[in-house]
C-alpha cells in the first residue's frame, strides 16, 4: 500500500499517525521534513494537493496539508505544529505552483512566515489591511469583541 | 524587450459581474503575463463560522456561492458527519444527490449561456438561460427556494421530497433533456464556436497537476478525477453513471465535458427518483445530539470541481476551525498558463472557461472602523476607491 511505503521511507520524520478510516489518514511530521515528504508524495506517488488549513491553538500554530490520492479516495493530512511565538516553516511554492496562494493567505490571516516563498504578499487585502494584524488568530479582537 | 501594455479587466468584471481585477500585460495583441488581484469581496466566512452553531453554519456556507449554493452545505455535512460517525438514511442520501445534480444542471446551463455571451453568440445565451428556468422552478417546488435551498442538516435533510412530486420532476427532466439535445446540436457543430474555442486556452495534463486544478477544468485535459466516484458519498455509489473526460484541454473540450455531464446528471436524478419510491416517506433525518471533539474532512464534487471543507470540533456547539476550499481557488490560478501567449480577444473566453466563481474564492463587503463602529465606506466611496486603484495601477505600470 502506498501509505506503508511512505511510512517506511520516512520512518524517522513521521512522528505520529492516525487512521480514522481507510480513506482518512493523518500523519504528524517533523516540520523540517515537510519538503522531502511533499516532493515524494507529489512527484513519486502521484498525490494531488488539495489545500492547507492553519489553526491557532494552545499548542501553537498548526498546519494541516491536505493531499488527495484519487485512485483510492484517500485524504492524507500532513500535520505540523509550529512555534507559538515565531511560527515559520519552509515554503512549498518553489516546488509546486498549487501552494502559492494558500501560503500567502495563511501568512496574511495567521501571520505564519513561509521561508523562501517567491512572493509572500497579501493575497486578499492588498494595501487595504493593517500590517501586523492577523484576524484569524485566537488573540485577535474584532470590532464586536471590543464593543462587548 | 519591447514595452508591454497593461490592460486592466476589472476591478468589476464587465461581463461576469463580479469583483476581481485581471492585469493583462500585452505586447501588441498578445498576452505576455497575467496577474490577478482579489479580496474585493472577502467576507471572512471561515472566521464567522467559528461564532455560529453547527446548525447556523449551514445557512452561512450556503451563501458562499449563489450558483452552487448546495455544494458547500453538502461538503460541510459530510465533514461534520465524519466527526460524529453517523450514517444517514438512504432516502436522505437520494434527496441530497438529487439536489446536488439538479444544481449541476442549472450551473452548467448558466455557464454555457455565459460562454455564448462572451463569444458574442447571444442565441446560445438566451436559450441556455431560458431552459435553466424550469430547473429553478423545480427547486422552488421541491425546496421552497429558487436558490439557497436550506435543505441540508447534520444527519439528513430538512424536508422530504414527497413521492407525489416525482412525476413533476420527471417531466422537467425530460424537457431539459430535449433542450440539452438542442443546445448540444447548436454548439458542438457550430463552425463559429469551433473557430473561437478550439485550440484556445489550452491546459495540458501537466498544467492541471501543477496547479492542482479540479472539476471539468481537469477532466477536459484528460485528468480523470471526480470526487463522486473516487471518494463516494451520498447516493453516488448506489447509481450507475460515468465520469466524462476529454483530451484536448481547450475551451471547446471544457464546454463538451460540461454539456455531456448534464446527461449524466439527468440519468443520476432519474435513478435516485426510482430509489426514492422504494424508501419510506419521511425517513430523512437521523437525530444527532452532540458533535464530539475531533476533526473531519468533507468533499463534494460541485459543478466547478471539488469543494473541500475541514472542520475541527472542540466538543462545543460551534466549530473551532472551519477551512473552506472552493474549486475556483485552484482553477483561477491556471490563467497564468491558459491566457499567456493568446491574443487579447481569446483571453476573455479563456478566463471564463474554468467557470470562475470569485465570491466562492474569497469568502469584507463593508469595512467597519474598530474604534467608532462606523462604516468606513459607503457605496460611492467604494466605487471611487475602486477607480483610484485602477488609476494608481495605470500610473505605475
Image (spheres, coloured by chain):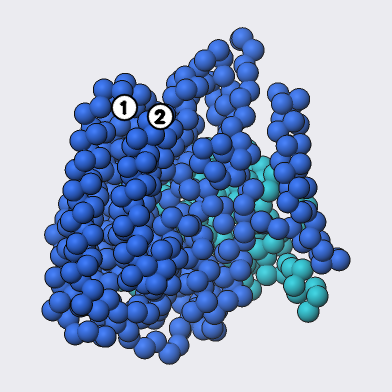
Chain colours: A cyan, B blue
Q: Are marks 1 and 2 on the same chain?
A: yes
Q: Position of residue B7 (x, y in %)?
A: 61, 25
- Which residue is located at x 78 percent, y 53 percent? B377
- Give the side of residue A20 with respect to residue B150, left or right: left
Judge whether B48 appears above or below B267 on screen. Answer: below
- Which residue is located at x 46 percent, y 77 percent? B294
| Residue neighbourhood size for the residue with mark 2, other residues' Cα within 10 Å, grouped as few (<14), some (14–19), many (≥20) | some
Q: Chain of mark 1?
A: B
Which residue does the numbered mark 2 point to in the structure image? B119
Q: Pick the residue in front: A5 or B66.
A: B66
Which residue does the numbered mark 1 point to in the structure image? B193
Q: Chain of mark 2?
A: B
- Which residue is located at x 46 percent, y 84 percent? B292
Q: Position of residue B45 (x, y in %)?
A: 58, 63
- Give the side of residue B360 with respect to residue B132, left or right: right
Q: Position of residue B23 (x, y in %)?
A: 60, 30
Amino acid at each position: 500500500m502506498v501509505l506503508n511505503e511512505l511510512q517506511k521511507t520516512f520512518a524517522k520524520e513521521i512522528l505520529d499517525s492516525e487512521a480514522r478510516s481507510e480513506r482518512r489518514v493523518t500523519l504528524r511530521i517533523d516540520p523540517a521534513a515537510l519538503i522531502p515528504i511533499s516532493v515524494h508524495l507529489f512527484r513519486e506517488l502521484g498525490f494531488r494537493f488539495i489545500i492547507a488549513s492553519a489553526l491557532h491553538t494552545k499548542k501553537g500554530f498548526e498546519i494541516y496539508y491536505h493531499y488527495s490520492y484519487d485512485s483510492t479516495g484517500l485524504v492524507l493530512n500532513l500535520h505540523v505544529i509550529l512555534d507559538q511565538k515565531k511560527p515559520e516553516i519552509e515554503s512549498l511554492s518553489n516546488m509546486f505552483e498549487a501552494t502559492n496562494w494558500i501560503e500567502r493567505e495563511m501568512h496574511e490571516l495567521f501571520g505564519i512566515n513561509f521561508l523562501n516563498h517567491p512572493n509572500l504578499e497579501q493575497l486578499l487585502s492588498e494595501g487595504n489591511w493593517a500590517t501586523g494584524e492577523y484576524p484569524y488568530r485566537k488573540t485577535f479582537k474584532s470590532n464586536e469583541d471590543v464593543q462587548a | 524587450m519591447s514595452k508591454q501594455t497593461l490592460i486592466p479587466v476589472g476591478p468589476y468584471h464587465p461581463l461576469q459581474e463580479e469583483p476581481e481585477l485581471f492585469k493583462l500585460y500585452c505586447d501588441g495583441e498578445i498576452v505576455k503575463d497575467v496577474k490577478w488581484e482579489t479580496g474585493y469581496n472577502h467576507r471572512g466566512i471561515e472566521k464567522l463560522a467559528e461564532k455560529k452553531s453547527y446548525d447556523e453554519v449551514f445557512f452561512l456556507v450556503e451563501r458562499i456561492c449563489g450558483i452552487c449554493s448546495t455544494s458547500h452545505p453538502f461538503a460541510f455535512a459530510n465533514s461534520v458527519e465524519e466527526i460524529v460517525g453517523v450514517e444517514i438514511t438512504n432516502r436522505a442520501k437520494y434527496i441530497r444527490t438529487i439536489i446536488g445534480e439538479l444544481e449541476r444542471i442549472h450551473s452548467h446551463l448558466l455557464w454555457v449561456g455565459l460562454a455564448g455571451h462572451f463569444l458574442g453568440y447571444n442565441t446560445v445565451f438566451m436559450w441556455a438561460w431560458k431552459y435553466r428556468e424550469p430547473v429553478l422552478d423545480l427547486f422552488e417546488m421541491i425546496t421552497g427556494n429558487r436558490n439557497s435551498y436550506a435543505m441540508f442538516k447534520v444527519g439528513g435533510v430538512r424536508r422530504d421530497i414527497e413521492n407525489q412530486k416525482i412525476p413533476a420532476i420527471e417531466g422537467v427532466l425530460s424537457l431539459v433533456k430535449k433542450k440539452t439535445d438542442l443546445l448540444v446540436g447548436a454548439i458542438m457543430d457550430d463552425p463559429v464556436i469551433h473557430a473561437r474555442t478550439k485550440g484556445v486556452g489550452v491546459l495540458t495534463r501537466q498544467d492541471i497537476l501543477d496547479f492542482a486544478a479540479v472539476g471539468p477544468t481537469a477532466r477536459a485535459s484528460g485528468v480523470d478525477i471526480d470526487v463522486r466516484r473516487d471518494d463516494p458519498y451520498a447516493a453516488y455509489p448506489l447509481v450507475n453513471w460515468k465520469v466524462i473526460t476529454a483530451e484536448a484541454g481547450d475551451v471547446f473540450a471544457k464546454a463538451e465535458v460540461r454539456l455531456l455531464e448534464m446527461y449524466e446528471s439527468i440519468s443520476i436524478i432519474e435513478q435516485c427518483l426510482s430509489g426514492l419510491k422504494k424508501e419510506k416517506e419521511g425517513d430523512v433525518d437521523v437525530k444527532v445530539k452532540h458533535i464530539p471533539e475531533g476533526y473531519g474532512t468533507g468533499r463534494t464534487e460541485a459543478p466547478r470541481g471539488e469543494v473541500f471543507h475541514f472542520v475541527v470540533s472542540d466538543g462545543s456547539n460551534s466549530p473551532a476551525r472551519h477551512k473552506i476550499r472552493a474549486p475556483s481557488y485552484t482553477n483561477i490560478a491556471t490563467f497564468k498558463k491558459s491566457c499567456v501567449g493568446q491574443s487579447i480577444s481569446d483571453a476573455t473566453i479563456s478566463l471564463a472557461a474554468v467557470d470562475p466563481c470569485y465570491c466562492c474564492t474569497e469568502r469584507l463587503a463593508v469595512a467597519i472602523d474598530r474604534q467608532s463602529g462606523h462604516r468606513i465606506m459607503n457605496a460611492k466611496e467604494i466605487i471611487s476607491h475602486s477607480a483610484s486603484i485602477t488609476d494608481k495601477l495605470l500610473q505605475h505600470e
